[in-house]
Amino acid sequence: MLRPKIPTMPLPTGLVTPPAVVHPTAIQPAEQPSALVVPTPAPGTPARPIVQVTPGTALAVIGAGTAVVLVVGTVLVSMLLATAVTAASVAVCAVVVRSLMASPTKRQRR
C-alpha cells in the first residue's frame, strides 16, 4: 500500500523512425601558404570617417534630447498620478464597505 509503483514505458505505436547513423570521415589538412601576405592600408586614408559637429547639429541633438526627456517624464508622471488616483478610490471604497458592514450591528444594539 505504501510502496510506490513505477510506471512502465509503453511500447511505441505507429511509425517509428530509426536513429540517424553518423559515418566517420577522414580529415584532410588544408594546404599551407608559403608566405602570409598582410594587406597594408593605403596611406592618407583615415580608418573611420570623421564626424564634424556643427552648431546646428549640436542644437538639433540637444533639442531632440530635451523633447525625449520631456515626453518620458510626462508619461511617467501620468502613470504615477493614475496609480495614486486608483489607490485613493480603492481606499474610499474600503471605508464605505467597512461602514456598511458595521452599521447593521450598531442598529441592533440600540
Image: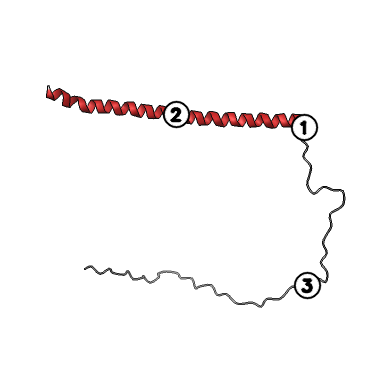
Alpha-carbon distance for marks 2 and 3? Answer: 70 Å
Residue type pointed to by label 2: Ala
Up-down relation of residue 2 to residue 45 (above or below): below
Q: How crowded is mark 2: few (under 14 residues within 10 Å), some or many (20 or more)?
A: few
C-beta proximity under 8 Å, tags 2 and 3: no
The residue labelled by disc 3 is 32
- Residue depicted at 15% across the width and 23% down the height: 107
Considering the image in quadrants, where does the N terminus appear? bottom left
Q: Is residue 84 left or right of residue 1?
A: right
Q: Is residue 49 left or right of residue 71?
A: right
Residue type pointed to by label 3: Gln
The residue labelled by disc 1 is 54
Up-down relation of residue 24 to residue 63 (above or below): below
Q: In this view, does 23 lie to the left or right of 88?
A: right
Query: Which comes before the other along the chain, label 2 or label 3?
Result: 3
Considering the image in quadrants, where does the C terminus appear? top left
Instruction: Give the x, y percent position of residue 103.
Output: 20, 24
Q: Is label 2 or label 1 in front?
A: 1
- Tell which of 1 and 11 is nearer to you: 1
Res 24 label: none
Asked which secondary structure carries label 3, the reply is: loop
Instruction: Give the x, y percent position of residue 106.
Output: 17, 24
The residue labelled by disc 2 is 82
- Residue depicted at 72% across the width and 75% down the height: 29
- Residue depicted at 38% across the width and 30% down the height: 87
Query: Which comes before the other along the chain, label 3 or label 1?
Result: 3
